[in-house]
Image (spheres, grey):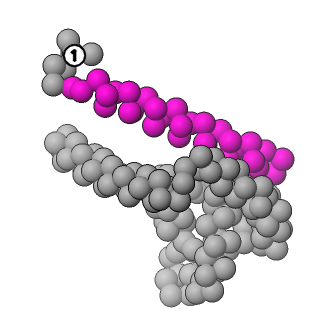
Amino acid sequence: MQNFHPEIDPKTVRLMDELGYVARSIFHMREQSIDEAGLSFAQYQVLMHLFFAEQMGNQGELNPSEISDRQGVSRNTMSAFIRNLEDEGLVERRLDPDDRRRFNISLTENGRSLVGEYMHDHLATVGHCFSALAPDEQETLLVLLQKLGRHVMAVRQEMVIGNR
């Protein structure tokens, strides 16, 4: 490695590998926790975002842009997710009363029921993944990941600006 980049600390490459391994493992376990639902985890996440928006009490609808931003996927990808979920009868779209050029997405009764059916197992899986860490270690990890995330976003932005 140091032949290619003499200043690189080999530990950073190891951190990248470990972070990738853990993230892929957790992703795989999340997928398995909802396998029976017949949805991808990304589709289930759309349903969860809508479910939590309802539970917060202030809105039961989100527009596709809000959902794609929350999930970190493109607008086109989100449109495909929503179309599939709509075909399955899990979500419905309505014109936005404030802006008739846009529409909002909400859960159907079937969508709400499906989220409720798998939520317990999904949350148990997530909780079990992080049970290896004490509460203070979880908090430290959260702070460090947020710090790393902000830095990665800044680096990404620099790369976008540099490619113009």
Question: Can residue 58 be seen at all in this image of the molecule?
Answer: yes
Q: Position of residue 26 (x, y in %)?
A: 60, 42
- Residue 116's place in the image compared with 37, above or below, is below
In screen coordinates, is 43 left or right of 97?
Answer: right
First to last magenta residue range: 8-37
- Look at 50% across and 76% down and name the residue there: 101
Q: Helix, strand or loop at disc 1?
A: loop
In screen coordinates, is 127 left or right of 16?
Answer: right
Q: Position of residue 161 (x, y in %)?
A: 18, 47
Majority secondary structure of magenta residues: helix
- Look at 66% across and 64% down and name the residue there: 48
Amino acid, disc 1: Gln
Residue 9: in magenta span = yes
Quadrant of the image containing the N terminus = top left
Mark 1 Cα within 10 Å, few/some/many (few <14, many 20+)? few
In screen coordinates, is 40 left or right of 102?
Answer: right
Question: Can residue 89 be seen at all in this image of the molecule?
Answer: no
Residue 6: in magenta span = no
Quadrant of the image containing the C terminus = top left
Q: Quadrant of residue 119?
A: bottom right
Q: Position of residue 39 (x, y in %)?
A: 75, 49
Q: In the orientation shown, which residue stands out farthest toward the top?
A: 3
Q: Quadrant of residue 124?
A: bottom right
In screen coordinates, is 147 left or right of 69?
Answer: left
Q: Position of residue 19 (x, y in %)?
A: 45, 37
- Residue 116's place in the image compared with 57, above or below, is above
State the residue position of label 1: 2
**Considering depth in this image, is 143 or 152 the residue closer to the camera?**
143
- Residue 123's place in the image compared with 112, above or below, is above
Count of residue discs: 1
**Considering depth in this image, is 56 or 128 the residue closer to the camera?**
128
